[in-house]
Amino acid sequence: MNRFRRIGVLGGMGPEATVALMQRIQAGTPARDDADHIPLLVDMNPQVPSRIQHLIEKTGPNPGPVIADMAARLEIAGAEALILPCNTAHHYEQYITDRVAIPFLSMPKLTCDTLTGLVRPGTRIGILASPATNQIGLFQSLLSDRGMSTLWPRDEVTVLAAIRRIKTTGPTLDDLSVLQDKTNELVDRGASAILIGCTEFSLIGTELSAPVPVVDALDVLVKAALAFSGTGTP
């Protein structure tokens, strides 16, 4: 029997994005039988304090300690690496890595590494993500270290409203229209690639049309998880 390394999933941020991650891992596995799939240990915890309330509204508690507790539970349960299908929550990465000894596969870092192989240094990357990631400089810092800069939609209020709607009711054609409009804007302003940096947007990202590469951070994380487990190619 195959010995695949177990992946621990820090889930629930949001729940539908976590399910999408698991579906993409299953779909991306070259399996002929049940035993060919990788084992996932999932902590689906929708009660993690809101990242938006903590980072944007400044009204909510710090999610970091809760996420760190989840990471510790997954390590004890046998996880050999951890993944987190929420880009904004990677702001609390230090809480995770301080708490566990197993690897943490950082979705934003892996995604920015992927972009270095697609575009030239000095180019600009259009970001479709929560305004919280803009405020904390998550992608700006990572891409700057790799010789790139970022472009964000001018109207981030509309972007945040779409994220909240998707969390509430799931994605709709209206949300896809918002995302397509923002993609067009970013390309018109000079983006050489589009980064889907919100896992709520990953739910409809495949339906976007753009004349430049579109890189979905969730897909990058799936590929990394499969490679770590031993089923996929690096």
Image (tube, rainbow, N blue to C red):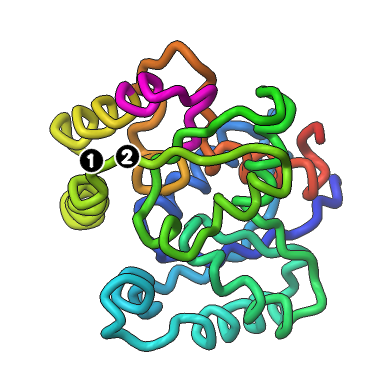
Chain part drawn in magenta: 184-195
Is 204 located above or below residue 95 in the figure?
Answer: above
Q: Is residue 147 above or below residue 138?
A: above
Where 73 sits versus 213, above or below? below
> Residue 73 got which mark?
none
Q: Is residue 172 left or right of residue 95?
A: left
Name which residue lies at 78% across and 49% down: 229
Amino acid under disc 2: Pro
Q: How many marks?
A: 2
Q: Which residue is drawn at the image coordinates 45% and 68% (left, top)?
A: 44
Image-based side of 179 in relation to 96, left or right = left
At mark 1, the secondary structure is loop
Q: Secondary structure at mark 2?
A: loop
Q: Name the residue located 31 percent from the left edge and 70 percent from the top edge.
A: 56
Q: Quadrant of the C terminus?
A: top right
From the viewer's perspective, is residue 107 above or below residue 97?
above
Q: Which mark is residue 153?
A: 2
Displayed quadrant of residue 48? bottom left
Marks 1/2 in contact by CB < 8 Å: the verdict is no
Q: Is residue 189 magenta?
A: yes
Circle nearer the viewer, 1 or 2: 2
Q: Residues within 10 Å of mark 1 (few under 14, many from 20)?
A: some
Q: How far apart are the alpha carbons under marks 1 and 2?
A: 19 Å
In the rendered image, residue 115, in percent from the top left (x then y), is placed at 65, 32
Amino acid identity at mark 1: Pro
Q: Position of residue 75 (x, y in %)?
A: 72, 77
The location of residue 140, given as percent across then percent down, is 56, 51
Considering only order in the chain, which callout, 2 or 1, is on the residue closer to the N terminus? 2
Which residue in the protein does label 1 denote?
Answer: 171
Question: x, y percentage for residue 51?
Answer: 38, 71
